[in-house]
Image (cartoon, rainbow, N blue to C red):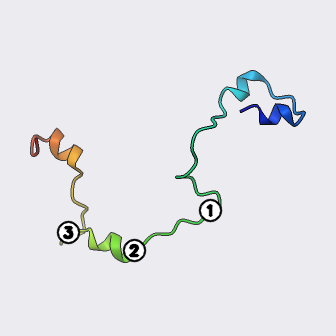
Amino acid sequence: MLEPRSQGRDVPGEILSHISPGHSDNINFFGVINVDVEAELAKLDTAGWRPPRAAQLRELGLMP
């Protein structure tokens, strides 16, 4: 990510090494999170808990 330097900015290498050109598809730059509340509530069991994930079930030895 050399764009700041190509724009004439003096950016120390120590700072530039922490800037990643990685993907940003999962980052919301607008500060708004849209959640389908009804769909999330439908995932809860009768006690109001979410079911364990498959990885958690494997850790507990409840799933191969």
| Mark 2 / mark 1, whichever is N-terminal | 1
- Examine the rendered structure and indicate whether residue 41 appears above or below residue 30: below
Q: Residue furthest bottom?
A: 38
The numbered disc on residue 31 is 1
Question: Label 2: which residue?
Answer: 37
Q: What distance separates the C-alpha of mark 1 from that of mark 3?
A: 30 Å
Question: Label 3: which residue?
Answer: 45
For the point 59% across and 66% down, the residue is 32
Q: Report how many numbered discs are placed on residues in the image.
A: 3
- Examine the rendered structure and indicate whether residue 37 appears above or below residue 29: below
Nearest the eye: 34 or 22:
22
Left or right: residue 40 compared with residue 24: left
Q: Quadrant of residue 59?
A: top left
For the point 40% across and 74% down, the residue is 37
Task: Provide residue 5's location: percent of width, then percent of height.
Answer: 83, 31
Task: Provide residue 61's location: percent of width, then percent of height.
Answer: 10, 40
- Residue type, label 2: Val
For the point 27% across and 73% down, the residue is 42
For the point 20% across and 68% down, the residue is 45
Task: Provide residue 62's location: percent of width, then percent of height.
Answer: 9, 45
Q: Residues within 10 Å of mark 1 (few under 14, many from 20)?
A: few
